[in-house]
Amino acid sequence: MKKLKVLLAEDDVTMVALLTTLLKMEGYDVSATQADADILAAVRLENPDVLLMDVHLLNQSGLDILEAIRKSEDVPLTRIVMSSGSNVREECINRGANGFLLKPYMPNELITLLKQTITSN
């Protein structure tokens, strides 16, 4: 069975390390992109099942990247889960996110949301 792939776009290196460890323990194939990288290009290259992206990246807006991904016709259908320390759930969903996690969140909340997001159409 193919491992599901998660791409992380997060500016906190400790969070990236923790998420990578957790998701690998749960059986996911995990890769991470630099917070100031071209995340749209990374999605094209990596073709993840899910992009887990922070709303506030170093010099970029996760919301702007979310909109760019949704408007790009050459990007395969990628499920996107946004996360933030601010409750911007409604804005994320309205702009095309499949899910939202309010930081700080528990590992089981992330795993449950990923499973729901991956199995939903």
Image (spheres, rainbow, N blue to C red):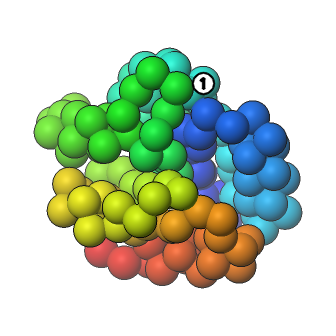
Q: Could you tell me which quadrant the N terminus lies in? A: bottom right
Q: Can you give x and y, in whole percent of width and height, for residue 40 in the image?
A: 36, 29
Q: Quadrant of residue 26 in the image?
A: bottom right
Q: Could you tell me which quadrant the C terminus lies in? A: bottom left
Q: Can you give x and y, in whole percent of width and height, for residue 71 in the image?
A: 15, 39
44 up-or-down from 89: above or below:
above
29 up-or-down from 118: above or below:
above
> Residue at the location (72% across, 42% down)?
16
Q: Amino acid at mark 1?
A: Gln
> Residue at the location (45% across, 21% down)?
59
Q: Secondary structure at mark 1?
A: loop
Q: Can you give x and y, in whole percent of width and height, for residue 13 in the image?
A: 75, 35
Nearer to us in this view, 36 or 79: 36
> Residue at the location (41% across, 65% down)?
87
Q: Which residue is mark 1?
A: 34
> Residue at the location (49% across, 33% down)?
57
Q: Going by the image, does 112 lie left or right of 20?
A: left
